[in-house]
Amino acid sequence: MENLLVAENVYKRFGNFTALNNVSINIPKESIFGLLGPNGAGKTTFLRIINQITMPDEGEIYLDGRPLQPDDIAHIGYLPEERGLYKSMKVGEQALYLARLKGLSRAEAKERLNYWFKRLDIEAWWDKKIQELSKGMAQKVQFVITVLHRPKLLIFDEPFSGFDPVNANLIKDEILQLKKEGATILFSTHRMESVEELCEYIALIHKSNKLLDGRVSDIKKEYKSNTFEVGLHAQDEETLLRELEEKFQTGPARFKSIQDDLKISIKLKEKESSNDLLQYLLSRARVNHFVEVIPSVNDIFIKTVTQNA
Amino acid sequence: MRNLRLIINREYLARVRNKTFIVMTFLSPLIFVGMILLIAYLSMLNSTEQKIIGIHDESGMFAAEFKDGEQVQYLDYSSKSLATARQEVLENEYFGLIHISKIESSFGKPEVEFFGKDTPGFGTVENIEKTISDKLTREQLIAKGIDVSEIDKARADVSVQIQNFAGEQSSKMSNYIKMFFGGAAGYLLMMFIIIYGNMVMRSVIEEKTNRIIEIIVSSVKPFQLLLGKVLGTSLAGLTQFSVWIILGTVLLFGISSFLGIDPTAARSPASAGIDNAMKPEINQLVIDILKLPYASLLSFFVIYFIGGYFLYSAIYAAIGAAVDSETDTQQFMFPIILPLILGIYVGFFSVVENPHGTVSTIFSIIPLTSPIVMLMRIPFGVPWWEIAISIALLIATNFAVLWLSAKIYRVGILMYGKKPSYKELYKWLKY
């Protein structure tokens, strides 16, 4: 698949502190890409480099196959983590101003703003000052400003912080809609459930280094350990358990079930297949539950970060 | 360029629409004109007030020498006793009583005392002393047999006619006029820098605390934003100045003609002493004022005004970017104010004394003080090459400071929660 954004061997140092150490990331076109990492890992620095707010010390960034140029800001929409608006300026006025800074004409900006304000049901705010709005309301305005110039690449740094669940869902749907319309989305977040839900690709940055990147399903395949959780019903559970413990590498299982079952997790060796296990179990007991353990992004995140601590 | 125009536009409107700005723009001329009219009114009151001073002259030699004037009237109490005289002056609430003791001969020295409720002004005391000592000197000369009328005839008044080698005449007063023009220009520049430089700084801090800065710098270069801010604010400043000047002039002459107060009376202490004998001097003065090189004065004023304002605004913007709130700016303020104050001091002390002396010359070339000091020197005539060096240095420094400020600005606007030290600022320069 073709990449929209390619970062090659990017380095950035602030004095003695290295913020990015040889980071390379490819973001495929029309995908949702999650940039993960603990606080202070270098995510924001990387996003600022893409937005040309800071320059990398070494390395290249390519957008659509060409090295990044100053004019490319028109193709990028950025919602920074530290975001706000002019307190004493009216909502409509500053939305127009910020849209025109992105290169839209006055009439064009006005038309699109009307569309978006109607769509998010915030038309009544046009003549209000930001200081009269709540934080969540202001966030909606910022979202509109970010996407207004229809950029190819949308960058959201912690987009859901400050939103209540209803509005967070609303924004999530809008993001999915934008993706459907052809935009590529780069996410930076700590909220693993939204990563799990939205992202097709992720990259994990920790202490200035990229530890991991790729398609979420590939990474999960790589991290899965051929382990299955089973729930069994048998006449003599204790004998069965002893038998299983002798034959396989077992551990406790944590799934919930309404049956009073024997719950156990079984790790298979590389050459053993799930079918063999299932056949064996079927001959011994009634199988109520049989699921392969797939690591969550959260698990992968914690595992990778603690391994490299 | 399009973005720069948008930014200038927004910054200008943001300043101009600010409520405090509007109030200050329209209130300041009112306050200013009110003050001038009040001073004029009070000095008119002052000059119409007449003091009555009693004289108790025991020898009867001096009483006749005190002549009534517009502001003073003398009453002779010599025929009464000192105690009665004091009593009467006190009861009538006169200004005071002069007591001159008896002297044996013309060569004696009388004791002079002044009784009064309030301490008399410096001028009054000097006048009393001069009248008595003049009379005494004359009496002593006469007693020695010298013809006083011959001395009066022989008294010669000399007035120096100042000319330069090109034969142009100028008056003694003209130095004050030049000082006035130069000083006003320098002072105006300093005020402008402090007021609007602070405005630039506050607007940078505002963008930081509002957290809008990162949204903006993802669309425009920080340098553009910096430039737009400085330009937009200066345009707002020029607007305010124009309103002040127009409104001030209209108000001053409108109200004063309505109330019948002469605003020039406020300047009376200086002009009060001018009598007919000084007429030629005044004519020369008018010629001098008309002869000042207005075209070059104005163009240099504009050049130094822009150069100086840009230089300092860039520094103000960098400070604004480095801090999180206005209270953190204190440690950085002093180095900005210092050269400005120094410029004004050098201007008012050194340039008046010797416009082309070493101190004046050096400070009119150092870029941080040159806008103020050179503006004060220019009316006195400065060699073109000195101006050229000074302007060239100012422009070069402007570029250097803008470059450095832009670097600090670029890093600073994205730094939160830190109160930077000078050492840290230096590190930012290398990022």
Image (tube, rainbow, N blue to C red):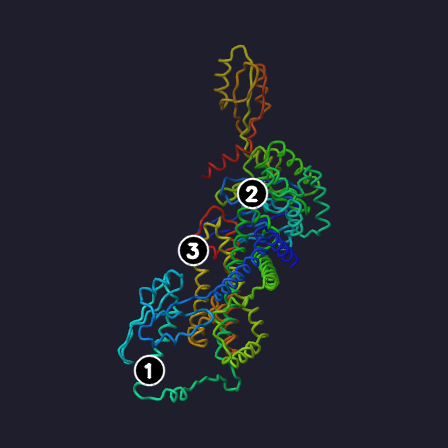
Image quadrant in which the N terminus of chain A is located: top right
Q: Residue furthest top?
A: A235
**Which image quarter holds the C terminus of chain A?**
top left
**Circle 3 SS class:** helix
Q: For the residues marked 2 and 3, what is the alpha-carbon distance in whole angstroms? A: 28 Å
How packed is label 2: few (under 14 Cα within 10 Å), some, or many (20 or more)?
some
Q: Which residue is mark 3?
A: B422
Q: Callout 3: 10 Å neighbours few (<14), some, many (20+)?
A: few
Circles 3 and 1 on the same chain? yes
Nearest the eye: B74 or A186: B74
Residue located 37% across and 72% down the image = B128
Q: Residue at point 65% right, 41% down?
A: A31
Dot 2 falls on a residue whose secondary structure is loop
- Quarter of image, res A115: top right
Horizontal relation, residue A198 to residue B101: left or right: right
> Tag 3: residue type?
Tyr
* Circle 1: residue type: Glu
Chain designation of label 1? B
* Mark positioned earlier in the residue sequence (3 or 1): 1
The disc label shown at residue B382, or none: none
Give the x, y percent position of residue B424.
44, 53
* Chain of the residue under the numbered disc 2 shown in the image: A
| Residue A217 location (% of width, % of height) | 60, 35
Give residue B164's position: percent from left, percent from top. 50, 84
Residue type, label 2 = Glu
Is the residue at mark 2 from the same chain as the one at mark 1? no
Front residue of B96 and A162: B96
Residue annotated with mark 2: A81
Inter-mark Cα distance, 2 to 1? 95 Å
- Give the number of the mark in front: 2 or 3: 3
Residue A294 locus on image (x, y percent): 57, 29
Which residue was labeled with disc 1?
Answer: B139
